[in-house]
Amino acid sequence: MDKKMRSNAYSLLSELIKPPTKRFFQDLTHGALEVEMEILSKGIGYTFEKNSLSEQQFLNFDDYHAQYTKVFNNVASEQISCAPIESLYKPWTQDPTAGVSWAKEKGFLYGDPALHIESIYNALKLTIPTGYEKKPDHLGLMLELAAILVDVTDEEYQLQFMKDHFDWLEEYIKVLESKSKHTFFINCIEIIQKFITWDMNRMERNLKVS
């Protein structure tokens, strides 16, 4: 498998869920995104289910940005509805000494997953991008980190990273389906989740053989 192509695949998937840019919107509406996914498919031996991306019906970039914000950035106090942030979908901490009554509850930012992602950034001597300091476990950022890990770590480490940090996506898809009627964004998460599952299964097979 082409290692660089695999890294590029994670980078591309991160664009599906990161805050919108005009360049990405142009790639989406003009078909360039699907072409790039087709090239990556040949390089890594995986066929992306990309047809649903062409079914988007945004009027323009401003409409796309507004719909993204409505689905993913619905902020209510410390809790964020449908935000693609791992900490929100897991108990805030497993630390038995945590001195807060809601330590085992879900729905709060900057929990154990965020701290672990932060520690990986520190170990790699990387800086968490501006705006993500309290949510380093945002799905878009973790996909970018996965792309980096493909380049600098072995598959055993990568597999454990994915087991630790992408196991909430099936639950997240159900949350999106219950709270949002915008199928485009649900399709994006499904594309991401299916690729990660495929890649994890592939790595598990390789590690068993070795």
Image (spheres, rainbow, N blue to C red):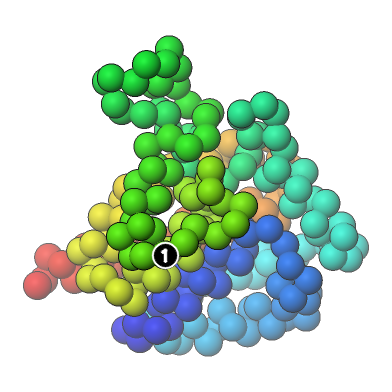
Q: Amino acid at mark 1?
A: Leu
Q: Quadrant of the C terminus?
A: bottom left
Relative to 169, residue 140 above or below: below
Along the viewing direction, whichever of 13 and 93 lies nearer the viewer: 93
Indicate left or right for 172 with 62 as reference: left
Asked whether the viewer can see residue 41, the reply is no
Give neighbour class at mark 1: few <14, some 14-19, many 20+ (Cα, 10 Å).
few
List the single residue furthest toward the right: 59
Indicate left or right for 96 with 11 as reference: left
Indicate left or right for 70 with 39 as reference: right
Image location of residue 104, percent across then percent down: 39, 21
Identify the residue at image location x=81%, y=59%: 64
Along the viewing direction, whichever of 205 and 133 lies nearer the viewer: 133
Q: Quadrant of the N terminus?
A: bottom left
Identify the residue at image location x=30%, y=60%: 123
Relative to 208, residue 178 above or below: above
Image location of residue 167, percent across then percent down: 38, 45
Identify the residue at image location x=62%, y=63%: 16
List the single residue furthest toward the top: 101
Q: Across the whole image, how many numbered discs are drawn on residues? A: 1
Q: For mark 1, what is the residue?
A: 126
Residue 161: which quarter of the image? bottom left
Identify the residue at image location x=38%, y=58%: 121
Image location of residue 74, percent across then percent down: 72, 37
Q: Secondary structure at mark 1?
A: loop
Image location of residue 47, percent across then percent down: 48, 75
Residue 176: which quarter of the image? top right
Relative to 170, residue 88 above or below: above
Asked whether the viewer can see residue 52, the reply is yes
